[in-house]
Image (tube, grey):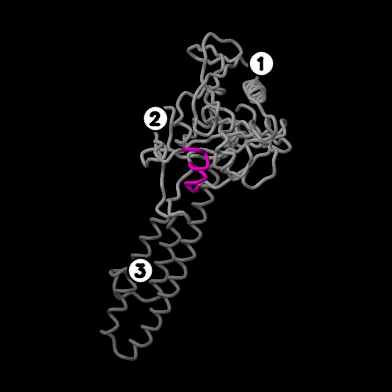
């Protein structure tokens, strides 16, 4: 269609533009007039064949027509795109009666739950809750607790040591028990005292009942005329309340710890089934914690006169207490961050004045 007048080109374009009912047809119109082989392009190429006076006038008209075609194509395209959008919106439907997506809510971890329960129990027995650093000195972790230099616990296969050294040129270490807090508290506070400490401890061990990091609670009572009878009464009350039985069956079995003398392992009566561990009925004994009277050497290392003050101490794994009370078979699962596990064993949070406790989820 080369050599057509601008008026004829304009009329042809108007007819084709009006006939274009979708974006695909509109694109064909654009190519027919503005493409490399389009009508406008072809006519512009022919200008060189006309006399100069005709070329100037005809070129201006063709360029004016070209700009008008571009404007018309743009407006038409916007209109067709709007029609497509409105048609798409009209065809969509959202059922507002459908239930909303479930919102995941956090759970109280069994360790956090048990720590809150323990703090609640011992606070009612007038115990304070003390804290201390996880990186400790050799003195607080071993020497002050009457642990001999050749004791296996001092070896690197049992204890995690740190390259930095203390004032005695001994390496710092990750505490292996919460007894370090007892040492710090005895050196700092006035006597008598009742205290518990709860926190993370570290030992080089890993199986279904041991992990390199674990949680421990330790208790300490210092005062005049403290006896094993006081220790037994304290533990009997604590275990009965924790396991929610009227009076837990308990026995003290002679043992040895460097920091207590005499020392004992505490067993509680229980009955095992394939699914449960029952504490209120028993046909066997289960070891639960260690305890004893504070060794005089430990008191002396904290500048306490063993002739004036005596004391008892006890310690237990918080993870183990959680496993026994809530039927968790493998200690390693506490640290695997499995959301399904937490939803099963976790607790719904409750606001309880003074403590953050939960109810079984």
N-terminal of the two: label 3 or label 2?
Answer: 3
Q: Compared to 302, does 38 lie above or below?
A: below
Q: Nearer the viewer, mark 3 or mark 2?
A: 2
Quarter of the view holding residue 197 = top right
Name the residue nearer the viewer: 233 or 13.
233
Which picture quadrant has residue 127?
A: top right
Q: Is residue 45 left or right of residue 346?
A: left
In the rendered structure, the answer to whether residue 214 lies left or right of residue 205 reads: right
Q: Position of residue 247 (x, y in %)?
A: 66, 15
Q: Give residue 246's quadrant in the image.
A: top right
**How far apart are the alpha carbons under marks 3 and 2?**
79 Å
Nearer mark to the viewer, of 3 and 1 = 1
The residue shown at (61%, 13%) is 280
Element carrying mark 2: loop
What residue is disc 3 on? 33
Reading the image, the residue beneath label 1 is 247
Of tags 2 and 1, which is closer to the observer? 1
Q: Nearer the viewer, residue 204 or 358?
A: 204
Q: Residue furthest top?
A: 283
Magenta stretch bounds = 135-147
Q: Which residue is mark 2?
A: 207
Mark with earlier residue (2, 1): 2
Q: Secondary structure at mark 3?
A: helix
Tell me where residue 182 appears, x and y as whole percent: 59, 40
């Amino acid at each position: 269609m080369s050599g057509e007048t601008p008026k004829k080109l304009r009329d042809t374009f108007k007819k084709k533009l009006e006939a274009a009912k979708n974006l695909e047809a509109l694109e064909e119109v654009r190519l027919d007039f503005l493409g490399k082989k389009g009508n406008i392009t072809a006519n512009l190429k022919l200008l060189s064949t006309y006399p100069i006076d005709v070329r100037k006038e005809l070129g201006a008209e063709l360029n004016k027509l070209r700009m008008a075609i571009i404007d018309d194509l743009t407006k038409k395209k916007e209109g067709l795109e709007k029609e497509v959008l409105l048609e798409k919106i009209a065809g969509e439907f959202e059922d507002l009666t459908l239930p909303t997506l479930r919102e995941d809510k956090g759970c109280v971890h069994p360790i956090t739950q048990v720590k809150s329960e323990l703090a609640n129990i011992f606070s009612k027995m007038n115990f304070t809750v003390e804290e201390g650093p996880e990186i400790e000195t050799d003195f607080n972790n071993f020497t002050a607790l009457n642990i001999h230099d050749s004791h296996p616990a001092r070896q690197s296969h049992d204890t995690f040591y740190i390259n930095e050294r203390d004032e005695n040129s001994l390496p710092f270490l990750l505490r292996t028990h919460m007894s370090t807090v007892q040492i710090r508290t005895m050196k700092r506070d006035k006597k008598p005292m009742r205290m518990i400490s709860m926190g993370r401890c570290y030992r080089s061990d890993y199986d279904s009942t041991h992990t390199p990091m674990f949680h421990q609670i330790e208790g300490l009572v210092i005062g005049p005329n403290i006896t094993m009878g006081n220790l037994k009464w304290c533990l009997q009350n604590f275990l009965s309340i924790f396991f929610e039985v009227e009076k837990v069956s308990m026995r003290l079995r002679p043992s040895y710890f460097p920091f207590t003398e005499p020392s004992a392992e505490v067993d509680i009566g229980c009955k095992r089934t394939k699914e449960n561990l029952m504490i209120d009925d028993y046909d066997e004994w289960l070891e639960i914690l260690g305890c004893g009277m504070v060794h005089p050497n430990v008191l002396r290392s904290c500048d306490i006169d063993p002739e004036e003050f005596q004391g008892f101490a006890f310690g237990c794994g918080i993870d183990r207490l959680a496993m026994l009370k809530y039927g968790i078979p493998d200690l390693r699962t506490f640290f695997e961050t499995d959301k399904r596990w937490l939803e099963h064993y976790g607790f719904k949070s409750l606001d309880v004045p003074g403590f953050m406790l939960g109810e079984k989820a």
